[in-house]
Image: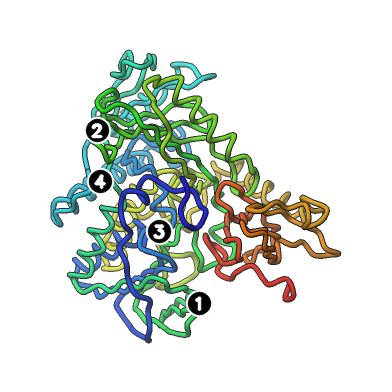
Amino acid sequence: MKSDSGQTLSVWMATAELPQSEPLRENTSADVCIVGAGIAGLTTAYLLVRAGRSVVVLEDGEIAGGETCRTTAHLSNALDDRYYELERLHGAVGARIAAASHAAAIDQIEAIVRAENIECSFSRVDGYLFVGSGDTPGTLDKELDAATRAGVMGVKRLARAPLDSFDTGPVLHFPMQGQFHVLQYLAGVAEAIRRAGGKIYCGTHVDRIKGGEAPEVGTSDGHTVRAKALVVATNSPVNDMVEMHTKQAAYRTYVVAAMIPRGTVPAMLLWDTEDPYHYVRLQSASDDDHDLLIVGGEDHKTGQADDAADRYQRLENWTRQRFPQVESFAYRWSGQVLEPVDGLAFLGPNPLDKNVYIATGDSGHGMTHGTIAGILLTDLITGKENPWAAVYDPSRKSLKAFTELARENLNVALQYTDHLTGGDVGSVEEIRAGSGAIVRRGLKKIAAYRDEHGVLHERSAICTHLGCVVQWNSGEKSWDCPCHGSRFATDGHVVNGPATAPLAKVEDS
């Protein structure tokens, strides 16, 4: 299924309206200015207004309209980087903080749902980790020991998950996980922020962020927001060029949603141990006879593959093999995941930038990491001590993650060799309607897209972040940067940071 923009459409976008808000039209001020109205930004705004702070939220698009609306909305403290790996990287204390903070995030979401009477299908469900192909049950034993040391409540090994359709084999059972309808939830959170006096402005592009003693944010329309503190919650930070982007890598992950007869799969969360792993959950369909089985996986580095159709097909095949009751596939979409080199998000003061805080590095757990951000950043801004601060500190450096850091940054360096290669096609005449390709024209590389009416649209193929050559993403009809995950629409405007400026017009490149 497609959205009007040609992008694949998530279940949430199809089954709920995004809350609307007007753009910022004048200079203003607040105690805190938050850039980004996804789950991290809105949770932080909600908790700050509850703490008595005045808050302004600026959003380039719509509320929750970025990566938040592309989540599968798992709420889990069963972390896919595995507790034995987190223990190696962050020590026993760090692993315990990871477990406690993700559990607290689910509790916080539940508390907000109850306090604000938000109808968003929130429920507590059991989660099950099973062995993927090529792995052995010993992985479960290793993770059980580490999760127990980390204080994960109630985790235990069972012979199989309670499914009739296929035998998972041995599993780890994680009780008291959660799920919800993310857009319905954030619509309620946004309304609560407004009731408490917070301001939310959508359609407002931020192009300047300045920290220091007098922090301020500038918009492309020439307006300024002055505040005592700034929070950048834009999935990938748009306020620095290099510092945070060497510590994490952007990946695309793919999702399909299948129609199944209601009641044939119990409500639960499922994950396997493959790399990349599969993740499964259930959501009620719009009719009384069906549920939606949501299945994700098939990740790859952003801008480094263009085979979405094959990846969706593999997901559908994987799903049908294990759930033969599938009648049809109703939705498919992809999202962007930022993988930190050491498995945990970066939440806290932006390095070397006074009074600026960031939330990034979701690591595939954006809903809980984003909620942790709200709790932690609220404490930091209001002067409260928080025992999680050191573990999530964006300035942290982990020597134990050096190998992963070196591998990811070598991968980035190799992408710059694209400047020396030819184009995807020899001439623009080879580009079919509804498709795009990179064309070399002398010393320049051009991102050329031919729309459904046959009209050709050309922009510079050089990412405005750090100068990599963007690549065509046929699944989302976008230009994706293979270095740090910036994404651009076919007309060149920014879809995802860290870039803040559009792809240059050809005559200006």
Please rate how many residues cluster around mark 4, counting C-alpha atoms within 10 Å: few if below 14, some from 14 to 19, many from 20: some
Gap between marks 3 and 1 measured at Cα: 21 Å
For the C terminus, the quadrant is bottom right
- Residue that sits furthest to the right in the current view: 442
- 42 vs 333: above or below: below
The coloring applied to the image is: rainbow
Q: Amino acid at mark 1?
A: Arg
Q: Is residue 248 left or right of residue 256?
A: right
Is disc 2 placed on a helix, strand or loop?
strand
| Residue at the (30%, 46%) spot, across then down | 101
Residue 267 location (% of width, % of height): 26, 30
Labels 1, 4: front one: 1
Element type at marker 1?
A: strand
Q: Are marks 4 and 3 in contact (CB under 8 Å)?
A: no
Instruction: Determine the residue located farthest toward the front in the rendered image.
Output: 453
Q: Which residue is mark 3?
A: 65
Q: Is residue 197 left or right of residue 90?
A: left
Residue bearing mark 4: 104
Cα gap from disc 3 to disc 2, whole angstroms: 26 Å
Q: Three-letter amino acid code at disc 2?
A: Val
Q: Residue 53's x, y, as percent?
A: 23, 73
Amino acid at dot 4? Ala
Question: Where is mark 1, residue-wise?
Answer: 208
Query: Residue 167: which disc?
Result: none
4 or 3: tag closer to the N-terminus: 3
Q: Nearer the viewer, mark 3 or mark 2?
A: 3
Q: Give the SS element for disc 3.
A: loop
State the separation of the CA atoms marked 1 and 4: 34 Å
Q: Is residue 87 visible?
A: no
According to the image, label 2 marks what residue?
A: 125
